Amino acid sequence: MLEAASPSLPPAVLYPATVLLLVLLARAMGKTPHASGKLLLAIIWLRFVMQAYHEITFTSVGGVSINALASVTVCGIGGIVLFRQLPQLGRFPILLTLVVVIAISGLANGVLMPTIETIVKWGYFAVVLLAIQDCIRRDGDTRILGLLLWSFAPPLVFQLLSFALGVGKATETDGSVSYVGGYNHESAFSIVLVTCFAVASLVPRLSPVARLTLLGACLVGIFAANYRTSLIALAPIAFGYFVFGAARSAGRDRRVLVSLLGLLVMCGAIVAANVMMGDRLTDLGAVASGSGDLIRPPEEFTEAERKLMSGRLYLWNAYIAEYRAGSDVQLLLGNGADSWIEVFGLYAHNTVVSYLYEFGIAGTALIIMVWLAMIIRAFRISDWALRGQLVCCHIGFILLNMATMPFWQVEGLILYGLLAGYTYSASLASVAPAPRPVMRRGTAPPRGRRLVARHPRTNLRTDPAGQEPQS
């Protein structure tokens, strides 16, 4: 990224607010009996708070930033707390292969430290993935998501303070200002709000007023952050909630009706968004209506074309041209992690383009396979409403990758860790209400079949002996 940072909040406001938010976090952590749940809440809260202290956390200690040291610490503590869950990573062979390719690419190009930093980021993802899976496995439902909302209190509070105090960052040529709660960059902050929106839309047993308030706060917050890429990614996630997610809390005989009403709401929202943001999305229309020759040497771009999509289209072609000029090994494995920094100084704002340059055709193919595998996993969920909602969430995340790089930021890996962990757990469990066996007094259950007990506050079916949810 390497762009000008946003100013931090004044210490006289930031420090007391952080102490209060820490008290709220401790209260939420006390409500989960599992070490994995406490860990999940703490590491996500910590990451979100540290970004508001970027003038401190971005400084180096022995050549390594405090942020990086914190990530290493999270991986270490997470490995200890989740030690028994580590074998579960074997269920994600494509992800493991991707990490191996990242390591080999780093060794082949002699970029050791950036490679280690990238692998540590994926380690953060693994901790989030395993922690949420462990919580769901232990509780038999997704109650951890409700507690997790307290970890999102810092960015929401910090943004409110930044707006009240006028602490913003001018990011556009039209003079508009981004209010990002003292975060370093609006991209990371908007990804946090997208994550909060997704979690709030998935939380079970949340009152409609509280849910809609949170969703509205996230939507307004993304507008205030002034990062339109996140708004585009948010659209499928919002569609997933109003068309599918809202139907999950309705009675079985009203689910289709609620889904149709949600569809009407989303149609109206799309029309309103087109009217309100038409001037901000004209670049997309210009690209879509173009001749189709979007990939060509960067020197062939006119001055006007270089400004399309905030310069992204021109930047992508510069990356691709540089990649094509590499050796055979670089075409296969790329130029190594973060190798773009010395060449471009500005990240590609597109995960596929960046992975092509950094990790070659091998890394690019693997990251696309990761996305497809998770969507296929989401389609295995038996409840059509939850299935539709999670598929929409994955589509939104993929769109986010098309104009920014969530995998380069820990905030993006937190989002995908939560989404992937929940999707995998839901695909293993039967989340659709199953008919209870009709038993007459004095009769025994049919041979070869086992009665399934229900968790009192969820539809997930668990074995009476306390085993994992049954598929």
Image (spheres, rainbow, N blue to C red):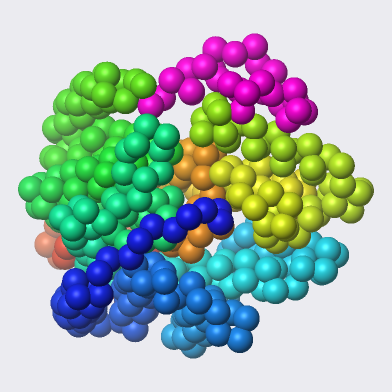
Q: Position of residue 399 (x, y in %)?
A: 48, 38
Q: Is residue 287 left or right of residue 444?
A: right
Residue plotted at (34% across, 41% down): 226
Q: Position of residue 440 (x, y in %)?
A: 14, 57
Residue plotted at (39% across, 51% down): 186
Q: Quadrant of the C terminus?
A: bottom left
Q: Please determine whether, in this image, residue 58 is positioned above or below residue 294.
A: below
Depth order, front residue of 33/304: 304
Q: Which residues are magenta?
A: 280-306
Residue plotted at (22% across, 43% down): 220
| Number of numbered markers | 0
Q: Please determine whether, in this image, residue 164 is positioned above or below residue 308.
A: below
Residue plotted at (50% across, 76% down): 59
- On whether residue 291 falls in the magenta region, the answer is yes
- Note whether residue 405 is visible: yes
Q: To which quarter of the image does residue 240 belong? A: top left
Q: Is residue 28 left or right of residue 312?
A: left
- On whether residue 236 falls in the magenta region, the answer is no
- Note whether residue 146 is visible: no
Q: Residue furthest right?
A: 328
Q: To which quarter of the image does residue 185 belong? A: bottom left
Q: Position of residue 398 (x, y in %)?
A: 50, 42
